[in-house]
Amino acid sequence: MNGAYPSARYLPLGDTALTVEFGDITCLEVNRKVIALNEAVEKAGITGIVELVPTYRSLLIRYNPAETSYEQLVSQLKEIEKTIEEKPIEAQTRRLIVPVVYGGNYGPDLKFVAEYHGLTEEQVVKLHSGKDYRVYMIGFVAGFPYLGDVPEEIATPRLETPRLKVPVGSVGIAEKQTGIYPCEAPGGWRIIGRTPIKLFDPQWHPPALLKPGDTVRFKPISEQEFKNIEELVQKGIYKPLFEEHTQ
Amino acid sequence: MNFLHVLKPGFFTTVQDLGRYGYLKYGVPISGAMDMFSFVAANTLVANNPNDACLEITLIGPELQVLTDTQIAIAGGRISVKVNGEDAPMWQTLTVHKGDIISLGKVEGGCRSYLSIRGGINTPIVLGSRSTYVRGKFGGIEGRPLKAGDIIMGFDVSLLDVEYKLPENLVPQFTGSFTVHVVLGPQADMFTERGIKTLFSSQYKVTIESDRMGYRLEGPTIEHKGRAEIISDALLPGAIQVPRNGKPIIIMKDAQTTGGYPKIAVATTPDLDMLGQAKPNDTIKFSEITPKEARERFLEYHKRLSGLAERLIKVT
């Protein structure tokens, strides 16, 4: 079963959760359905639901089995699923400008990515920063945005052996995905640059800067600009650059 | 108020409560006590709320000096407890006085023990919880395990007039072999019939690569039908992932929130708490139940947990 499903699949996860799966593909159409169901379920305020986790192609729903049951939730959710089909797709999103120093020590794999595709480093940077990316989901570690889709010309497989430590702010590519490490973590993505901006802080409400459905655009900057922004971030006075954005 | 001074921190001792709720969508794991039954029992024995923060002790216990008269209880994996060198019981309210030295030994049965303090441990609440999330470096004491010299703070609450103990028949026994009830799915259809049969007919061993994030298991290889990757989706504690090598990984409380390996099945709540007591070289067998049976077991377990206070016996 590949692609978008004709109707959603409902699947149990143990005794406290279920997932509503819209397809076996990463694409805008499927992800929009996920986000639309997420919003509709949040609004519906169904008894017993503990939390919702939207991902690329599915919505995880955690519930308290003392207050509801798998069967009851599935029938309530199927009613809501019908209503989202008629909902117009989102047109307005927020676009975050993410400043990045590409290459060198900041992006140790930029050279590999360029050679892998027979391009120059400048061409890779131009392609990576030349388009808008959708935030498909937040996961892996706190605040990590999964962004897509990377242009085919620079889509690159992961490292064969993941690094034990990827520095905070690293911007990487894994196949057609790109992402930003909000904290130091192990990882196998090809690191092509680094941003000085902060994506996650447990003291923020909400704690993550981005949410699924947002748009991200990378902006190449110099090492000096990186240091300037880094200083503002450390002082706590850097304002993330969000723009209204029509898709 | 300062309650305890950490003289020796033990192997890996963290502050935990019942965890964070509502932050998975930001990539923040649930965290919280690995064995909720023992955790709630420890709190109940000092008449705390079930969610009050306790110390979670892993394999080797800490040594603590009491700074303010208080009451504590120790529950979970079997561990030797000494107060000023004298043996003291687990699963019971213990009144301790300023200057006392509490020494906890090795966890002999199980993997994790819980130490509650009357009124609960006071650390800053981060994203709705006091649980320590070490990788994220937040929660508990500075987002890290205890170290020597730390001060454990608490609240100014009156002491209990009576001491309690848990009746013998409610004390769980952790023998090192676990039967884990699971519900098949969400990606069971990515495994062959033989692969699913392997899961339920084999014995798996907990490897040394096991911690609060997850347990890697060793045992017979579980066969995929074809590919061993999925489009990354949400993970939960209890999810059993099977990567390309066919060796299952059980996701635990501090795990990453999304993953790209198919999940053959998900362990149910009561068994997940038991699993919190599994340590390297322990053995695990899996047993399939339906979502309906899983809910009945959950409700029974929920009742047992919320009814613990009424089951306590006064110590005379």
Image (cartoon, coloured by chain):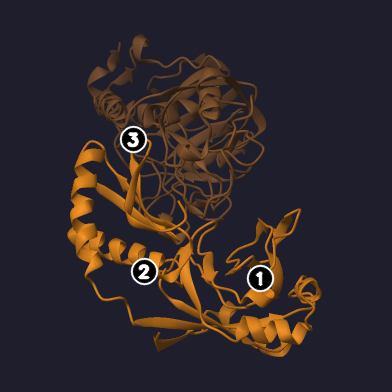
Chain colours: A orange, B brown
At label 3, the amino acid type is Asp
Chain letter of mark 3 equals A
Q: Which badge, 3 or 2, comes first in the chain's sequence?
A: 3
Residue occupying the point 45% across, 72% down: A210
Packing grade of label 1 (10 A; few <14, some 14-19, many >=20) is: many
- Please state which of residues B97 and A20 is positioned toward the viewer in this rendering: A20
Q: Which residue is mark 3?
A: A15
Q: Which residue is mark 2?
A: A32
Residue occupying the point 36% across, 34% down: B118
Packing grade of label 3 (10 A; few <14, some 14-19, many >=20) is: many
Q: Quadrant of residue B313?
A: top left
Numbered disc in front, either 3 or 1: 1
Q: Which residue is mark 1?
A: A155
* Secondary-structure class at tag 1: loop
Asked if the residue at tag 1 contacts the one at tag 3, i.e. Cβ–Cβ closer than 8 Å, the answer is no
The quadrant in which the C terminus of chain B is found is top left
* Secondary-structure class at tag 3: loop
Numbered disc in front, either 3 or 2: 2
Chain letter of mark 1 equals A
- Please state which of residues B127 and B278 is positioned toward the viewer in this rendering: B278
* Secondary-structure class at tag 2: helix
Q: Are marks 3 and 2 on the same chain?
A: yes
Could one spot residue A26 in this view of the protein? Answer: yes
Q: In the picture provided, is A4 more to the left or to the right than A152?
A: left
Q: Are marks 3 and 1 on the same chain?
A: yes
